[in-house]
Every structure is written in structure tokens, then in C-alpha cells.
Amino acid sequence: MFCKCRVVLTALLLTWTLWIPRLAMSEVNTVPSSFHPCSVPARAIYELSVLVLAICSGIFVVVTAMLLFVVVRYRRRPTDSAQEPPQIYGSSQIELAWTVVPIIITLVLILVTARTIGEIQNKNLPEDALMVEVIGHQWWWEVGYPQYGVRTANEIHVPVSSSAHPAPTRIILKSADVLHSFWVPQLAGKMQLVPNKINMTWIEPLQTGVYLGSCAQYCGAQHAFMLLRVIVHTPEGFQRWVASQKGLFAGSLATAAATTSRRVSSKNSTDLAANGRKTFFSTACVSCHRIDGTTAQGTFGPDLTHLMSRHTIGAGVAKNTHQNLATWVRDPQLLKPGCFMPDMHLTPSQIHEVVTYLETLQ
């Protein structure tokens, strides 16, 4: 009976062991692990990491084996004499071995690491490569596409690359205030964003999907909620995204009616959006936020032109839903304590109208 139970448990354990990695692989694009690289530079970093881990593991195994051998082979026995054995000094062979071998290992690690860093940093990208400008703010990411005149926040959209159609993306990194660090583990290594300095990195995703990133440099109270999403499209999907960002016009009441008609009547939604728009433009909102085609040209806060096309608000602090958006407008400190957006002291009806208006910004 005991043997049967053990066989069943073993089978269940093996099944679980084989199944769990498949579940993890099915969600690989949303797991920010550098051990599941999905981009050319990330794969180079992963291969370097595996080499370093293998060498360090080999050293650990050899040292541990030698230590165990000495402890077991030369342990004290009851028949041993109480007299201390003769001490041995000055073995040139041993001293030479423990000096030369570590130097060789260190040199190998330095040279391989330098070669990988050099290949990544000195990569010659094609002149027509997509360029994305990322500016770190406390505590959100500003994202711009100079080639397309598109500006968004907290999400980077890029096309996937393939051997037939390589599509690397050059990412220009800047900081608006303090030190930040751009890191999307599955796509690229860390790169600092330094005030008054421009850094550059690049990605070349090989799989479509959503990849999570974050700020890897402590930058203030809400550093943990300075999250980033990289959405990798097919080439056709990326062009559609660009067209949607350029084609739909924010602030349009006609768009408002189309967007909100699923929840309320067209006339009511238009009225609500119109009132919300008046409230938005009569308060200090316009001083911090930008909406293309309107007088709102602020740059202190995220660009709201296509707010509702984003997955989250507050740089990943909450999903972009009607309820969360209303909570954010009512009191941003509830979702993100310490953020710089103030409570505008709007009435419940004004909040509802403003959120209705914001929901038109597709």
C-alpha cells in the first residue's frame, strides 16, 4: 500500500513539474524575468548570465567537494594520537594553482562581459530604425515618436522583428527630474536616465505580446509604481496603432457620443462630455496635461490625447476602468500617495462629467 501511494505521489509530482513550466511559458510575455528573453539584446545578456552562473556553479561544486573530502578523509578518529600532526608550509604548486586559476577565470569573465556590452552598446542600427523617446518623470514615463508626431505615456508600442524583416527600435532616454533607470527585463538590460544627459538603448523583440518593465533606480516615494508596458505588435498591427493615434481626434464630442453610447444615451453622453470638457478646461488640469487639438498644452503630467487606449492609469497603479478613473480624478492620493496631481475638489457630478469626457479620449 505504501509503495502504491509513493508511485501515485511521484506521478503527480512529475505531472505538476512538467505542467507548471508550460503554464509559466504561456504567460511568459507578462512575466518580467530576464531568464525568458524575447529580444536580441536580452538574449545576449541571458547567454552571458548563463555562462557566469555556470562558471560560478562549477567553482562552488569544486570547492564544496574538496571541503567535504578534507572534512571526511581527515576527520578525527578515536585511534588517532593526541599529538598534533606535522605542519606543511610552502607548497609552490598549490600557491601557483590558487593564484593562476582565479586570474584566468576572472579574465575570461571580464573579456566575455566586455564583449557582450560592446556588441550591445555599439550595435549599428539602420538609419530608418524606429526611434522612441522615453523621458522619466516622478513617477511616470513620457513616450514620444518623433517620426510620427505621436506622444503617449507609460506604454511603448513597437513592431516585432524577424529574420526576414529586422525591426530594431532605438530608444532615446532622458530624465526630467531625478535619476531613473529604464528596465524591461525580457527586452533589454538596464539603462540609466540622467538629468541633462541623453542615453541610448535599443530593443529588437522577436515575439509579439506585452512586456512589463519598471524603473530600476530608486527615484522617490512612488518609485515602486513607476511601471511600464511595452506592447509588441505585428508590423501591420503597429501601423494600425500609429494610424489610430494620429487619426482619432481627442476632445471631439462626436467621438464622445460614439464612445459612451454603449453605456448611456447619445444625447446624455454628449451633454455629460461637454460639461466635463468645460470643467476640465476651466480648472488647472490644462496647466499639467496636454490634449492635441485643444488649448491644453501642459507637459508636467501625462499626455491625455489617447488616454483610453492605455491599459492602466497612474503608471500601472490601476487598470484603466471607469471606476478607477473616477477614483483617480476624485483624489489621486488614494491610489498613488505622494504623486504630484492635486485633489481638484470637484463635486461628484463634476467628477462624473469629467470622467465621461476623459473616456472620449481614445
Image: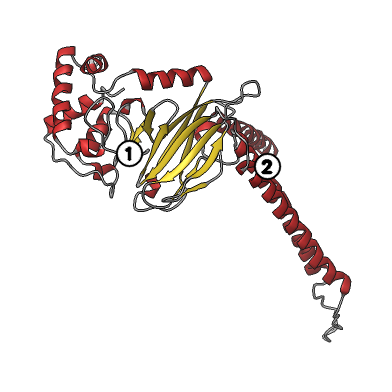
Hey, what amino acid is under mark 2? Glu
Task: Left or right? Give the position of 188 relative to 246.
Answer: right
Q: Residue furthest front?
A: 127
Q: Nearer the viewer, residue 357 or 9?
A: 357
Residue 38 at x, y = what percent? 59, 33
Hey, what amino acid is under mark 1? Gly
Q: Residue furthest bottom?
A: 83
Residue 98 at x, y = what percent? 80, 67
Residue 101 at x, y = what percent? 80, 62
Colouring convention used in this rendered image of the protein: secondary structure
For image coordinates 26% across by 22% down, the residue present is 360
Q: Secondary structure at mark 1?
A: loop
Q: Quadrant of the N terminus?
A: top right
Label ID, residue 314: 1
Q: Quadrant of the C terminus?
A: top left
Q: How many marks?
A: 2
Q: Which residue is mark 2?
A: 47
Task: Left or right? Give the position of 222 relative to 254.
Answer: right
Q: Nearer the viewer, residue 71 or 109?
A: 109
Label ID, residue 228: none
Task: Left or right? Give the position of 56 relative to 159.
Answer: right
Could you tell which of marks 1 and 2 lies nearer the N-terminus?
2
For image coordinates 56% across by 33% down, the residue present is 24
Residue 14 at x, y = what percent? 66, 35
Q: Alpha-carbon distance for marks 1 and 2?
A: 35 Å
| 71 vs 234: above or below | below
